Image (tube, grey):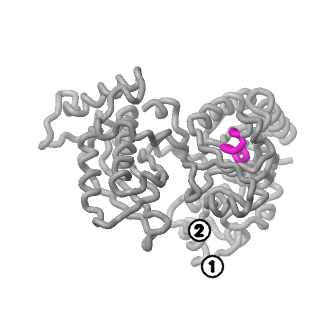
Amino acid sequence: MGRFSYLTIDFNSYFASVEQQMNPALRGKPIAVVPVMSDTTSAIAASYEAKAFGVKTGTRIWEAKRMCPGLILVPARHELYVDIHEHLKEEVQNHVPLLSTGSIDEFTCKLIGDECEPANARKIALNMKAGIKKNVGACLNSSIGIAPTRLLSKIASDMQKPNGLTLLEQKDLPHILFPLQLTDLPGIASNMEARLHRAGITSIEQLLSLEPKAARHVWGSVGGERYWYELHGIDVPKSDEGRRSVGHSRVLAPKMRGKDDARFVARSLLLKCATRIRRLEVVAGGFGLAVHPDYGSTNREPIVHESKISPTQDSFTLLQYLDQFWSELPKKSGPFRKVSIWLYHLSDESKRARDLFVETRPDGFTKKEILWRSVDKLVARYGRETVTLASQKDLGLQYLGAKIAFTRVPDAQEFRE
């Protein structure tokens, strides 16, 4: 019999399941978790009762209500989801050590020794499910995939939902994957699918029949070759490339979609990013911003700006870059639906090159950076509203910036910054 190396657990309809766990009145009901209570927004999660009507992540709420007349809208509570995430992580580690966190609703564990035997691996998975229901919440169903490689365990966790358990053995490969679509595989979205089609690959069977070097050519990098080996059950250790950027985005409430109001939201998101890079002890050498026109605009393409900057972690300097870009927006632009901010080209704060035109202290920091580091300490101790810019006061933006992305889970400190 085959042996296994990885176990991936994926929590089904996570945000919606957490809301049903916390509020018994929502259990068994079709619910959609939304960023704002508006029909113009989209669902960021749907319960399985809502999915039965065709409602899913990304469905516009006005359309979701038409599809599911009894749909209940629940405002997102990101801090709660992170808190439950931590409890789930603790319970998972009661059964097997955690290898990595794929997202807010996904963990991967490395199996070793006797744990790799099929019967033992299955028992671990079943005990894990039982422990979660007993110690964290009965509504938190999960699907578990067990396989020889990390990629295959992720694929296996998606093959039986909800509440599934799938073991992919080496003897079953690769033909067990043939019924899947290319976009069922992690990392293959519409753009990658189009690239594969241009290479004459329209099925998983064709993809798996490639030679490893051919897969590298299609991907345009060694990543394609690594992907091919993992699909064939050959484990390839994953390298750690470190953090490349920090960013925050926000879908704007209807009353905040005007150009001036959206600017204040963008400034607040940027201040949040600046606080994070100081806490991470890095400086940013690049600044990026994107504004997405509202649904009713004739041009729906986002306006995107990126520029290299002198490495800094000073909020005032970063705000100047933002205000300069905002002043260059067309006068009649807006209303905007969404604002995104990111800082990139991150480097160790102690190793940055000195800017000859900026006065710094012997330790390499500017006076303004020292000021903001003092502000960070006050905020960390006494709360977010202790010290803030007058222009940003009383915006009333719940969970400003600290939201959960597909591949990053914010830590508890971010909700207090």
Q: Nearer the viewer, residue 284 or 29?
A: 29
Where residue 172 sits in the image (x, y, percent)?
Answer: 82, 57
Q: Is residue 6 magenta?
A: no
Residue at 69% x, 39% y is 19
Determine the residue positioned at 55% across, 49% down. 36
Image x and y of residue 391, in percent: 29, 40
Image location of residue 127, percent across then percent down: 82, 32
Judged from the image, the secondary structure of the residue bearing numbered disc 2 is helix
Nearer-the-camera pick, 257 or 4: 257
Q: Is residue 249 above or below residue 207?
A: above
- What is the distance, in whole Å, between disc 2 and disc 1 at their CAs? 15 Å
Q: Does residue 162 appear in the picture of this structure?
A: yes
Residue drawn where x is 40% and y is 41% of the image: 395
Relative side of 320 to 151, left or right: left
Type of amino acid under label 1: Gly
The count of marks equals 2
**Residue designated by label 1:** 200
Residue identifier under label 2: 190
| Quarter of image, res 313 | top left
Q: Nearer the viewer, residue 200 or 20?
A: 20
Q: In the rendered image of this protein, does residue 227 appear above or below residue 382? A: below
Tell me which numbered mark, 2 or 1, is placed earlier along the sequence. 2
Dot 1: few (<14), some (14–19), or many (≥20) neighbours within 10 Å?
A: few
Q: Mark number for residue 288?
A: none
Q: Is residue 8 visible?
A: no
Residue at position x 61%, y 63% in the image = 188
Q: Which residue is at the front of the view, 381 or 193?
A: 381
- Where residue 326 appears, x then y in whole percent? 29, 56
Magenta-tinted stretch? 11-19
Query: Would residue 15 be counted in the magenta stretch?
Result: yes
The type of residue carrying mark 2 is: Ser
Quarter of the view holding residue 368: top left
